[in-house]
Image: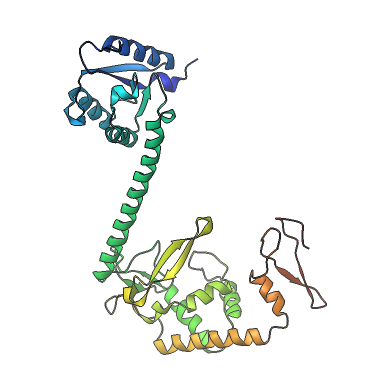
Amino acid sequence: MVAQSNRSKRVAIYCRVSTASQEDGSSLETQEAACRAFVAEHGWNVIDMYREVFTGAELFDRPQLGKLREAIRRREVDVVVAHALDRLTRNQAHLGVILSEADYAGVAIEFVTERLEDTPEGRLLQSVRGFVAEVERLKIAERTVRGRRARAQAGKLLPGKAAPYGYRWRDANRAALDIDPIDGPVVQRIFQEVIQGNTIRGIALQLTAESIPTATGGDRWSSSTIYTLLKRRAYTGEAVAWRYGSEKIKGGKLRILVRPEVEHVALPVGTIPPLVTPTVFDGVQQLLVRNREQAVRNNRNPEATLLRGGYARCGTCGTALNTSTKKSGEFYRHNSRACDRHG
């Protein structure tokens, strides 16, 4: 039994012969009969017929095919049926044009005597389609990059999904920032507490205890969130666009890269109002470096640090190993779910 969705498909049949009396016996009538039988077998509905006697090679000189292509572009049909691939065209470039138009309009092309993907032309076309799609993808990416760089050179920020924590967009154009009256003071407080000697972990715990929302609206601050915030030089009012780029790495993830300094675009003064002075920012950076060095010197279990950092991996499955400290102060490796060769 034919599905209801198939019955509703609108079909255009295209038949073509080179001369009025085709030598191979494939007349317009026999092609039409075979196509109609094919359509009936699938339970589709013929809404139009295109019959052409044409021997030339030019795609644009075939009036009936031109009308069919126009119907495809207007999405007036769901399926085009021809007797064979060479009845539609013998030219692979022309075939690529027709199929690309059909693909774009969501129209299927079917042949009575062969499946397109099983023919040499079809296999070639699959490669061509992939190549065309890749070229189009690269063109889109290039246009996007060009547009973003032009925006930066016009003195405008490159807007992300949200304004950086502590700021809000100045207007709907999102070309500049203003200090957020609620979140801005939180940023200033974090920098001041580091200067005063408070630890990042202590600051995170205190903000969480006070139920101060994070940048994402959460209620739990982490040390890594605080650390990332403290490294953001834009809080000094330094507005630079085109500083960062990205590249895809294994697993489809994106890696953030710092572009060469010659590619950076300095934005006008006032684009980002400062939340902290450069002196405070630089002082915090020095404290972060000093604290990190002290943590390394005071670490009683450097091996555990390597494990926690993902530097040690299972020789069998490659999974990063981690640790847990026992009461005795020793550490051990947890079993990995990936394999049972270590524990």
Name the residue nearer the viewer: 227 or 185.
227
Q: Residue at x 21, y 30 (%)?
A: 59
Residue 271: image quadrant is bottom left
Examine the rendered structure and indicate whether residue 191 appears above or below residue 332.
below
- Observer able to see residue 105: yes
Residue 77: image quadrant is top left
Q: Is residue 299 left or right of residue 231?
A: right
Residue 174 locus on image (x, y percent): 31, 65
Q: Residue at x 43, y 23 (%)?
A: 5
Residue 91: image quadrant is top left
Residue 40 locus on image (x, y percent): 40, 13
Q: Residue at x 41, y 79 (%)?
A: 233
Name the residue nearer the viewer: 116 or 68.
116
Residue 71 locus on image (x, y percent): 25, 27
Q: Quadrant of the C terminus?
A: bottom right
Examine the rendered structure and indicate whether residue 27 appears above or below residue 217.
above
Q: Is residue 102 left or right of residue 60?
A: right
Q: Residue furthest front?
A: 23
Name the residue nearer the viewer: 302 or 75.
302
Q: Residue furthest right?
A: 328
Q: Residue at x 32, y 61 (%)?
A: 145
- Observer able to see residue 210: no
Residue 239 locus on image (x, y percent): 33, 76
Name the residue nearer the viewer: 196 or 100.
100
Q: How is the image coloured?
A: rainbow
What is the number of callouts on the image?
0
